[in-house]
């Protein structure tokens, strides 16, 4: 009788498959030249995986946006001109802060420091549970994570 149950269980498993183990979240940290495919992100999010993508180039890009138009300002300007420039820059910063972009811009850098990442791209699983380095394909990153979870080599 036990052989029949085992055979039946194996048959059912092969017919219906085994539930795939998925991470709850992936923080993908890279730069602007190494980005994930939007369709991959949407696919995995539709399966319940929270995928966040962060660029380490974002702070410098924001700095360029905020400073746009002030590149050619001479070093010796009047106090009034400095005050006007300072006011304009603060207003631009407030705009980015108000829509949440300022925090988002630095989040990747904060995570990179928090997780002590050593190279990029880096896919951080489940708030630092594990990291996969050097892979840009989200499907492959998840496959590597699953293999590691099962102990496959």
Image: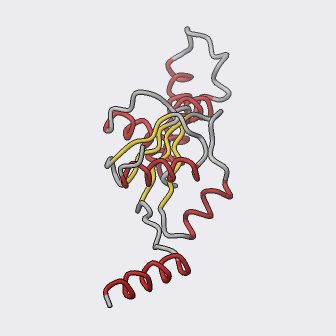
Examine the rendered structure and indicate whether residue 61 appears above or below residue 137: above
Q: Nearer the viewer, residue 13 or 101?
A: 13
Q: Nearer the viewer, residue 95 or 53?
A: 53
Q: Nearer the viewer, residue 29 or 59?
A: 29
Examine the rendered structure and indicate whether residue 10 appears above or below residue 106: below
Q: Residue at position x 57%, y 70% from top?
A: 46
Q: How is the image coloured?
A: secondary structure
Residue placed furthest toward the bottom: 1
Q: Residue at position x 53%, y 80% from top?
A: 16
Q: Is residue 112 left or right of residue 140?
A: left
Q: Residue at position x 66%, y 54% from top?
A: 38
Counting every numbered tag in the picture gives 0
Question: Which percent across, then down, holds residue 142?
Answer: 50, 53
Quadrant of the drawing holding the C terminus:
top left
Quadrant of the drawing holding the N terminus:
bottom left
Q: Is residue 6 left or right of residue 138?
A: left
Question: Which percent across, then down, holds residue 63?
Answer: 55, 30
Question: Which percent across, then down, holds residue 76?
Answer: 55, 8
Residue placed furthest toward the top: 76
Q: Residue at position x 35%, y 45% from top?
A: 130
């Amino acid at each position: 009788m036990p052989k029949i149950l085992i055979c039946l269980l194996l048959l059912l498993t092969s017919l219906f498959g085994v539930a795939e183990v998925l991470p709850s979240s992936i923080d993908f940290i890279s730069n602007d030249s190494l980005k994930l495919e939007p369709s991959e992100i949407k696919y995995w999010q539709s399966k319940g995986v929270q995928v966040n993508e962060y660029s380490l180039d974002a702070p410098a890009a924001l700095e360029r946006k905020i400073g746009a138009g002030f590149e050619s300002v001479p070093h010796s300007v009047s106090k009034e001109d400095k005050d006007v420039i300072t006011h304009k820059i603060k207003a631009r910063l407030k705009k980015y802060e108000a829509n949440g972009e300022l925090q988002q811009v630095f989040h990747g850098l904060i995570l990179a420091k928090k997780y002590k990442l050593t190279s990029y791209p880096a896919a951080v699983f489940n708030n630092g549970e594990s990291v996969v380095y050097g892979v840009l394909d989200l499907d492959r990153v998840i496959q590597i994570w699953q293999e590691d979870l099962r102990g496959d080599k």
